[in-house]
Image: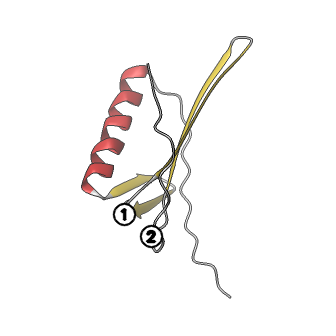
Amino acid sequence: MLENKQRFRHQSLQDCQSIQQMLDAIAKGIAKGELSFSDQDGEIRMNPQGLLDLKVTASEEDSRHRLEIRIAWQADEPLQAKEPLKVG
């Protein structure tokens, strides 16, 4: 069986304002149901719809702080709702 898998990965140093602009663009793309990511190495287009699975992980270890945000969905099968996240 052939696997239809596309991947896009980008890593760079950005200031807080640039990251905020990228997060705003992602939020607008999710609202429109159309996300597009590209850089000099590649491009991917996605169409989020229905219920999306959100995972937020925040951690502190010594002087290293990390925030990970993962959003996933399945195009052909609806996901089940989970408990709401509270951010403050």
Does residue 29 appear left or right of residue 9 in this picture? Answer: left
Q: Name the residue under label 2.
A: 75
Classify 8 as above or below 82. Answer: below
The amino acid type, in three-letter code, at marker 2 is: Ala
Residue at figure coordinates x 27%, y 50% from the top left: 31
Q: Which of marks 1 and 2 is in front?
A: 2
Q: Distance between the residues labelled 1 and 2?
A: 8 Å
Element on which disc 2 rests: loop
Image mark for residue 67: none
Q: Specify the quadrant of the image occupied by residue 66.
A: top right
Does residue 45 appear left or right of residue 12 in this picture? Answer: left
Element on which disc 1 rests: loop
Q: Mark 1 points at which residue?
A: 47
Residue at figure coordinates x 30%, y 58% from the top left: 33
- Nearer-N-terminus badge (1/2): 1
Q: Position of residue 1 (x, y in %)?
A: 68, 88
Residue at figure coordinates x 36%, y 44% from the top left: 26
